[in-house]
Amino acid sequence: MAKAKEHHFDISAKLDMQEMKNAVIQAQKEVDNRYDFKGIKKEIELNQTAKILTVLTATDSKIDAMKDILLSKMNKRGISLNSLEELKVEDASGGNRKVSYKIIDTIEKDEAKTIQSEIKKLKLKVTAVNQGEEIRVTGKNIDDLQAVMRHLKSLELKAPLVFDNFR
């Protein structure tokens, strides 16, 4: 008798850095062309190796406007808005304000535990195994796996979840 086929998918928090870079470039172009930003210092800088994004301009309200522009560009490129975590707001030279954001592209240990416990709470016939950078969810019933995905998407998690390798 043939064994029922196991299906699985992986949960990770991968981020397409090229898309992030493109979103930053588009946001910078829009800010450069906006009338309300004429004549003031304004920059959005992405440090890919340190995974830090900094926004620098004259006032907190201008920073909020720049962040809104950046988030809309990220959203259009399919990048989760949860990918940015505010680190600090500080005064910069020339009376400007500077905000630093950490780019989240991994699931941290605590969050991985939360995800696994949420999957257990569903009481479906699936198993979730932490594999370092990702969590593999396995089960015989595809509907159960899809229910897990739906449930996890509805949660307010810090990491921007990506579901791949659905087999």
Image: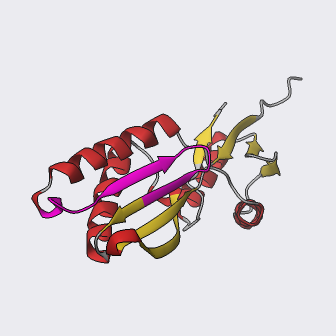
- Judged from this view, the residue extending furthest toward the top is 1
Spot occupied by residue 164 in the image (x, y as percentages of width and height): 62, 37
Q: Is 132 left, or right, of 90 in this rendering?
A: right
Q: Nearer the viewer, residue 96 or 89?
A: 96
**Measured along the vertical axis of the image, is residue 88 above or below residue 40?**
below
Residue 144 at x, y = what percent? 66, 49
Going by the image, does 46 lie left or right of 72? right
Image position, residue 119 (x, y; %): 71, 60
- The part of the chain drawn in magenta is 36-54
Instruction: Look at the image and say whether residue 97 sits in the magenta stretch.
Output: no
Relative to residue 53, is residue 63 drawn left or right?
left
Is residue 1 or residue 118 the one in the foreground? Answer: 118
Q: Residue furthest right?
A: 1
Task: Name the image quarter holding the C terminus.
Answer: top right
Q: Residue at x 54, y 68 (%)?
A: 156
- Check the picture and name the quadrant holding the N terminus: top right
Instruction: Please provide percent x and percent y for residue 60.
Output: 32, 76
